Image (spheres, helix red, strand yellow):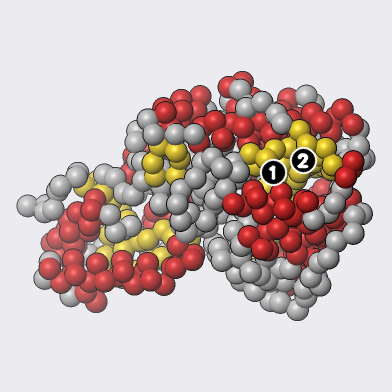
């Protein structure tokens, strides 16, 4: 099995994404892995992108601190695109993730995704392992 | 003669505070009124596209899901894209407006058509809504033409890459898709190395441009990268994804075009049509209402030879080197023997 050195977390600020972040933070701590928070910037974010990213970074800082992990261990990767396409590229440089962690649902209702959400489409197309954190799950213990 | 198909979406499919809003249609219609075309203007109103017409480009399961979602009252589809109870009918009407525009051009054997309809369509994938788009209006029209044996050129000058249109026609040798767009920018696709599937290698032409690129750079992209491919393809119809968000005033992106640049582009693209009556423009983006109105006036005025006022064309912005890079990257991709897959695993 490939050692998990880098974990990519899909993060849009939703409650499900926060649950996934908490889980990934604990997992990274246990494995000694690096953590990269991946955010896909949509069309609307172009108008007020700096503030959106600042708000997300603040949320992640709080989550990281609450987990007792040095916030400096978490990197950010913001990329234009839809969440699925951006996360599917997480296995490639510059992220080179060994594992993707996402919440079961992010923002939106994902009309057109037969199984209901970005996480399911990711699961169908990903070339690296993916971990989908169920709604309400906050710890891997 | 100008054939205007629509308007569609002048009051329907509305979300308070969202930039993709009904007022855009009012701005477009005001831009057409500015031309004072009199009897040279004909307005047509098509029927909403039916299931057979839509399933040429969208999966039946997606259409069913979107229908049910709207029927249940709609909501947020993703952080960018919304639907309301009337969105299903509005989107079908927009697609129908595109088909009606084609029919009208066929009847007249002359003129230019403009599809004044929203929501826009070029981000809509075969089985997914995204980027403000529910149904891919221009793809529905192109697929109808292809089903009748036509060879269709789609020129997409919207500031965003038309990932949906690219995906739908990725492996279709009867469609040539040409896009100039800001990069990096949503939706993240549109590199020059994306050239089409095994049955249509080279039928996707992407020229990504950096923020700040001016009209001369876009013209160079069309002339140097796209024109040789278009000339070889010899389209029988030309459709344009006419987004006006590459205008320097638009809040959604950072290209630096003027409305005079759109007029210039329109004249160039019209030259790709084999004869009069084979050119239709479809509204895509454009979110600054003043720029949108003036750009529509300039674009259609240039195509019709009608008097209009326009800003000067722009030049001197950055991006010329990216056109050269696109040529090289495209040549490299065409020279590879392995199959090039579309980005993001969205197929």
Is disc 2 surrounded by few (<14), some (14 to 19) or many (20+) residues within 10 Å?
Answer: many
Q: Residue furthest left?
A: A141
Q: Which mark is residue B201?
A: none
Query: Which residue is rendered at x = 19% and y = 54% of the image?
Result: A19
Q: How many marks?
A: 2
Picture coordinates of residue B244, whole percent (x, y): 67, 58
Q: Do the residues at discs 1 and 2 belong to one chain?
A: yes
Circle 1 SS class = strand
Query: Which residue is rendered at x = 49% and y = 66% of the image?
Result: A47
**Residue B234 visible:** no
Query: Which residue is rendered at x = 41% and y = 58% of the image?
Result: A40
Please report, as a chain letter, where disc 1 is located: B
Give the answer, above or below, for where B141 lies relative to B52: below
Picture coordinates of residue B318, whole percent (x, y): 69, 76
Mark 1 vs mark 2: which is more N-terminal?
Answer: 2
In terms of image quadrants, where is residue B261? bottom right
Circle 2 SS class = strand
Q: Which mark is residue B116?
A: 1
Seen from the viewer's position, the closer of residues B347 and B338 is: B347
Residue holding disc 2? B4
Is disc 1 surrounded by few (<14), some (14 to 19) or many (20+) residues within 10 Å?
Answer: many
Give the answer, above or below, for where B301 lies relative to A78: above
Q: Would residue B8 appear left or right of A92 to someone viewing this image?
A: right
Please report, as a chain letter, where disc 2 is located: B
Q: Would residue B199 appear left or right of A22 to someone viewing this image?
A: right
Seen from the viewer's position, the closer of residues B137 and A17 is: B137
In terms of image quadrants, where is residue A39? bottom left
In terms of image quadrants, where is residue B157? bottom right
Q: Are marks 1 and 2 in contact (CB under 8 Å)?
A: yes
Q: Would residue B65 appear left or right of B291 to someone viewing this image?
A: left
């Amino acid at each position: 099995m490939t050692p998990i050195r880098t974990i990519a977390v899909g993060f849009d600020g939703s409650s499900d994404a926060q649950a996934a972040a908490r889980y990934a933070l604990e997992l990274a701590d246990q494995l000694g892995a690096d953590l990269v928070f991946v955010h896909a910037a949509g069309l609307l974010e172009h108008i007020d992108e700096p503030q959106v990213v600042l708000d997300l970074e603040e949320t992640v800082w709080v989550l990281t601190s609450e987990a007792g992990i040095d916030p400096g261990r978490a990197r950010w990767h913001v990329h234009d695109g839809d969440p699925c396409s951006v996360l599917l590229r997480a296995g490639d440089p510059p992220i080179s993730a060994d594992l993707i962690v996402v919440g079961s649902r992010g923002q939106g209702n994902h009309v057109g995704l037969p199984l209901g959400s970005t996480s399911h489409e990711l699961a169908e197309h990903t070339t690296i392992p993916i971990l989908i954190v169920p709604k309400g799950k906050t710890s891997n213990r | 003669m100008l054939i205007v198909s629509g308007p569609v979406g002048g009051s329907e499919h509305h979300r308070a505070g969202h930039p993709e809003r009904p007022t855009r249609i009012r701005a477009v219609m005001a831009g057409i009124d500015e031309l004072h075309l009199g009897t040279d203007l004909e307005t047509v109103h098509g029927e909403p596209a039916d299931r057979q017409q839509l399933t040429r480009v969208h999966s039946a399961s997606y259409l069913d899901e979107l229908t049910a979602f709207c029927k249940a009252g709609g909501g947020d589809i993703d952080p960018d894209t919304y639907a309301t109870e009337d969105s299903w009918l509005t989107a079908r009407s927009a697609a129908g407006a595109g088909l009606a525009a084609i029919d009208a051009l066929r009847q007249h054997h002359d003129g230019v058509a403009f599809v004044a309809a929203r929501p826009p369509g070029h981000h809509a994938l075969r089985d997914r809504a995204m980027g403000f788009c529910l149904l891919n209006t221009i793809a529905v029209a192109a697929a109808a033409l292809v089903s009748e044996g036509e060879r269709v050129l789609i020129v997409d000058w919207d500031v965003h890459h038309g990932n949906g249109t690219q995906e739908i026609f990725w492996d279709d040798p009867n469609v040539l898709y040409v896009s100039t767009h800001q990069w990096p920018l949503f939706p993240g696709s549109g590199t020059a190395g994306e050239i089409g599937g095994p049955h249509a290698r080279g039928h996707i032409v992407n020229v990504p441009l950096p923020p700040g690129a001016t009209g001369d750079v876009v013209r160079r992209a069309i002339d140097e990268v796209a024109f040789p491919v278009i000339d070889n393809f010899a389209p029988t119809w030309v459709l344009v994804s006419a987004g006006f968000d590459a205008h320097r005033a638009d809040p959604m992106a950072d290209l630096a075009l003027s409305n005079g640049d759109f007029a210039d582009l329109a004249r160039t693209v019209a030259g790709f049509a084999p004869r009069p009556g084979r050119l239709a423009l479809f509204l895509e983006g454009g979110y600054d209402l003043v720029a949108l109105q003036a750009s529509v006036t300039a674009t259609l005025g240039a195509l019709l030879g009608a008097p209009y006022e326009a800003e000067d064309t722009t030049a001197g912005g950055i991006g010329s080197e990216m056109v050269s890079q696109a040529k090289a990257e495209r040549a490299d991709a065409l020279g590879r023997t392995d199959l090039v897959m579309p980005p993001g695993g969205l197929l």
